[in-house]
Amino acid sequence: MSTATATTRTPAPAVRRGPVVAVVAVAAGVVLGALDLAGQLALPYPWANLANSAALWAVAAFGLARWVRAGAVRCMVAGTVLLVVAVPVYYLAAALVLHDEVGNAVSAVGLAWTASGVLAGCVFGLAGHLRAVRPPFLAALGVALPSAVLLAEAAQRALRPHRGWDDDAWTAVIQVALAVVLVAAAGRGLRGRALAAALAVPLAAFGWVAFRVAGFA
């Protein structure tokens, strides 16, 4: 008498449909832009620094792309829409709450942030897609990219002149901790996490140089 052993396969996560992705990306951009200003006004330092962190905006694009679970292009578009929408929403919120000029959204600085949002949305949207692919190196690279941008911004803050442990120094510590948590949470297995951590270090160095070139120093 023989018994058949049935193997159960875990179903693949559902791919989000285009219209759903579009609505969620726009809504998330509105929330991100509004929360950025709210966090700066309501949170104590050093936490308020995180509300206006370019690195955390990049991580948000990565997180949205992970949720999208679709092809590279759709993930990149979703990340870009998220960040591009968040920029004018932030300036609109600042106009409503702080009585800033609404035109700041289309000023040179505002347009520079929008352009940065396009670039970051593509890069970190792609990173969210890579995390889901099968090759271990690409999956680790997908995790390393958002971790690296946190480390790069932490290095940028840490290397500024300090008077003891000021807010920038503590923000840098928090960002390093967030980078470690991200690798641990999003990495695929022990080897995948180790590879992601190893890749994040040189990528962070590149990111730090990019911050310097972009004038974030």
Image (spheres, helix red, strand yellow):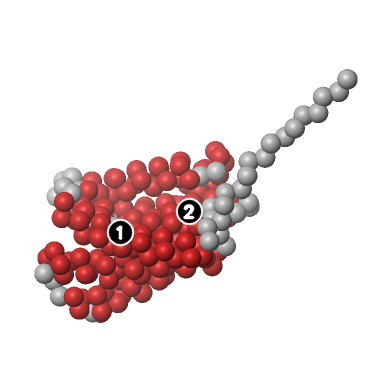
Q: Quadrant of residue 97?
A: bottom left
Residue 194 spot, x, y in % from top left: 52, 43
Instruction: Say above or below: 108 vs 202.
Output: below
Q: Is residue 20 left or right of residue 33?
A: right
Q: Name the residue beneath numbered marker 1.
A: 31
Instruction: Say above or below: 175 vs 109.
Output: above
Pick the front one: 13 or 43? 13
> What amino acid type is highlighted by mark number 2?
Trp
Which quadrant: the N terminus? top right
Q: Is residue 66 left or right of residue 109?
A: right
Instruction: Say above or below: 8 vs 67.
Output: above
Which residue lies at the image location 50% right of the left edge and 57% below the top edge?
68
Can residue 141 be seen by looking at this rendering?
Answer: no
Pointer 2 or 1: first along the chain:
1
Which residue lies at the image location 77% right of the left edge and 29% below the top edge?
5
Circle 2 SS class: helix
Residue 61 spot, x, y in % from top left: 41, 59
Residue 166 spot, x, y in % from top left: 17, 48
Q: Are marks 2 and 1 in contact (CB under 8 Å)?
A: no
Which residue lies at the image location 60% right of the left edge and 54% below the top edge?
133
Q: Name the residue beneath numbered marker 2.
A: 67
> What amino acid type is highlighted by mark number 1?
Val
Answer few, some or many: residues within 10 Å of disc 1's Cα (few below 14, many 20 plus, some between 14 and 19): some
